[in-house]
Image (cartoon, rainbow, N blue to C red):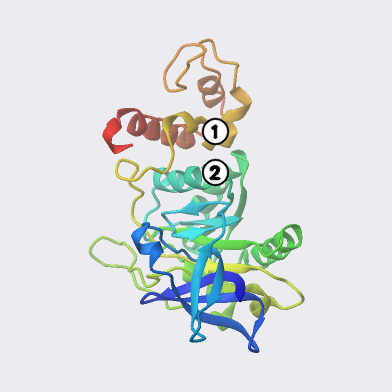
Amino acid sequence: MIISGIVTKSVGGLFTVSLDSEYNGKKTVDAHAKGAFKHEKITLLAGDRVEISVNENGELYISKILERKSSLIRPPLANLDYIFVVISCVKPAPVLETIDKLICIAESKGIECAIVITKSDLDMDFAKSTAQIYKKSGFETFVTSSENGEGKEEIYNYIRAKCQERENPIFAFSGASGAGKSTFINLLFPDLALEIGDLSRKNERGKNTTRKTELFSLEALIGDGIRGYLADTPGFTLLDFERFDFFELEQLFDTFREFRESEGKCRFTKCSHTKEQGCDVLRRVSEGEIPKTRHASYVALYNILKSKPKWKK
């Protein structure tokens, strides 16, 4: 007998799977992964679509991982459809280059990004100027505050609308530790009561209370026939492109969606879009069409990927 479903969390090698149809009256079961996964160096992720088999003793085990639409290292998720990239106005001070790296990773995997700027009540000027950067770059952008509820209804409606467009989509909130992901998710869905950490006074970095990725049923949280999953993910302080192979240099241009209009319009066929005369991207940056911070992130990533030793690729 084979049962199918989606992995929602793992604890000590035991995986919780939300089933497509009931098994012995249950919609959720726990199962171990077959031993061959470890030997084949296959890591099961939250979001994986799997098949579960039942052995002669009636024990359940995950026997097959179905083909993934995508998989991410940071956050550790499979088959993600939408990612809310969270930027804090203050504490921890935002590093837009790191934010842009996360966006590029998602773009390279075909995952739709939306930008969530938190703690707007602490610095509305920054919130508005940052929102303008990402709106101009073509992203759905939300200015939010857990203190006064700003942005709550807009994001709630965005999630509901997207659940109408795709079958059982997976959403994730991701960003720097302490950026306010869990706080805002709690505002959206109080029943979750996610643990919230404090900031380290020494370096103003967030304490990472979310240590593992877990999927929560939107059907249980929203009702009204809304089906899908929501993930709160571990925070991070950097995304190491030198250590991890997120994507190749040749893919970089396409991960900046606002650059695509310049494709084929530069003076030189092999334009790097970093410093060449006659570069259409640079022209659009100088004219304010492309935000300078976004181009600066592109150049930083270009230099990292270009200089990355081949043995690390």
Residue at point 71% right, 59% down?
162
Residue at point 51% right, 51% down?
125
Per the image, the residue denoted by label 2 is 107
- Front residue of 193/211: it is 211
Q: Is residue 93 visible?
A: yes
Which corner quadrant holds the C terminus? top left
Whether residues under marks 2 and 1 lie with C-beta atoms below 8 angstroms apart, the answer is: yes
**Crowdedness of circle 2 by 10 Å Cα count: few (<14), some, many (20+)?**
some
Residue 41 position within the rendered picture, expressed as x and y whole percent measured from the top left: 36, 57
Q: Is residue 14 left or right of residue 308?
A: right
- Front residue of 260/38: it is 38
Q: Is residue 120 visible?
A: no
Q: Which mark is residue 254?
A: 1
Q: Is residue 91 left or right of residue 49?
A: left
- Front residue of 46/257: it is 46
Q: Which mark is residue 76?
A: none
